[in-house]
Image (cartoon, rainbow, N blue to C red):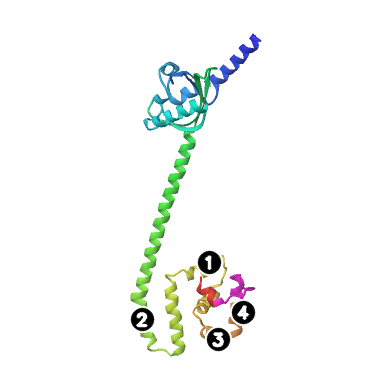
Amino acid sequence: MGIKSKKDEQYFQDFFDNAPVGFHVFGPDRMIIDINQAELDMIGYSQEEIVGKKTWVDLIISEQKGQAQQHWEELLNSGIVKDLPYTLVHKEGHYIYVLLNATARFDEKGHLLNTRGSVLDITKRREAEQAAHNKNIALGEVLARVESEKKQVKQEVADNIEQLIEPLVVKLRRKVDVSGKKILNLLEEGLKDLTASFGSKVSSPYLKLSPKEIEICNMIKRGLSSKEISDILNTSLRTIDNHRNHIRKKLNISQKDINLVSYLQMM
């Protein structure tokens, strides 16, 4: 029995000393009374500098000392604490991010004998998460800048249309016949679409509309009849009807009771 007990003790001591995670034991006064090599390597101290000389509070950043007191009281009340994030200060001054788990050991009268803690170094994971977070922030800033530039370009286009092209359209309207005015109406509406979303929506690669179908969509949206469209494009009425059928199929409304004019106006 004594031999087995001694072997068990040697086994657990070897496990404590050589585990790949940090292990420590605190006394009732919170002083560190034992610590393994893995945790010493984390903080850069020797065992002589730590054992009997430092507490957990001495090893963490000052901002966490208040929560350390709360966790100590929780440990005494419940006997266990799990996955507590802490920031240790290395002997050379840099930070080590860890997760602390601990249990408390009491005697038969309920008096605290010691606490046993494990410390997992999550510094690399924390740094990777921070790097990803910084990239997301940078990406968000780039996207916001692109969106701002798009709005600026859109406004500049609208201003140029208003100042340079619309006056010419007004002059042309005085000199053309009814058929010509219809074409001018289409031109004016098309110019407005340059600063609206309709043009980009109907030309989306997902819809796979041909340039001619996009042109006809624009006319349908303006309320022109198939006859009027055929006259403007100088093509047959049957051709325009075929285009309308193809457009409905590509918009996935060919089998639905949906008015094409209304549908396009809502895009």
Q: Residues within 10 Å of mark 1 (few under 14, many from 20)?
A: few
Q: Residues within 10 Å of mark 4 (few under 14, many from 20)?
A: few
Total numbered badges shown on the rendered structure: 4
Query: Residue at the bottom extreme?
Result: 177
Q: CA distance from mark 3 to mark 4?
A: 13 Å
Query: Residue at the left extreme?
Result: 163
Q: Magenta stretch: residue 62 in it?
A: no
Q: Is residue 127 above or below residue 38?
A: below
Q: CA distance from mark 1 to mark 2?
A: 31 Å
Q: Callout 3, which amino acid?
A: Lys
Asked if labels 3 and 2 touch by Cβ distance under 8 angstroms, the answer is no
Mark 4, residue position: 242
Mark 3, residue position: 227
At x 58%, y 18%, the residue is 12
Q: CA distance from mark 1 to mark 4?
A: 21 Å
Say whether disc 3 or disc 4 marks the residue closer to the N-terminus.
3
Asked if labels 2 and 4 touch by Cβ distance under 8 angstroms, the answer is no
Q: Residues within 10 Å of mark 3 (few under 14, many from 20)?
A: some
Q: Callout 1, which amino acid?
A: Ser
Please name whichever residue, 107 or 63, is drawn nearer the observer in this view of the structure: 107
Residue 194 is situated, as x and y percent measured from the top left of the image, at 43, 71
Q: What are the residue bounds of the magenta stretch?
A: 245-260
At x 45%, y 38%, the residue is 127
For the residue labelled by badge 2, is the local secondary structure a helix, a strand or a loop?
helix
Say whether disc 2 or disc 3 marks the residue closer to the N-terminus.
2
Q: Is residue 45 above or below residue 228?
A: above
Q: Callout 2, which amino acid?
A: Leu
Say whether disc 1 or disc 4 marks the residue closer to the N-terminus.
1
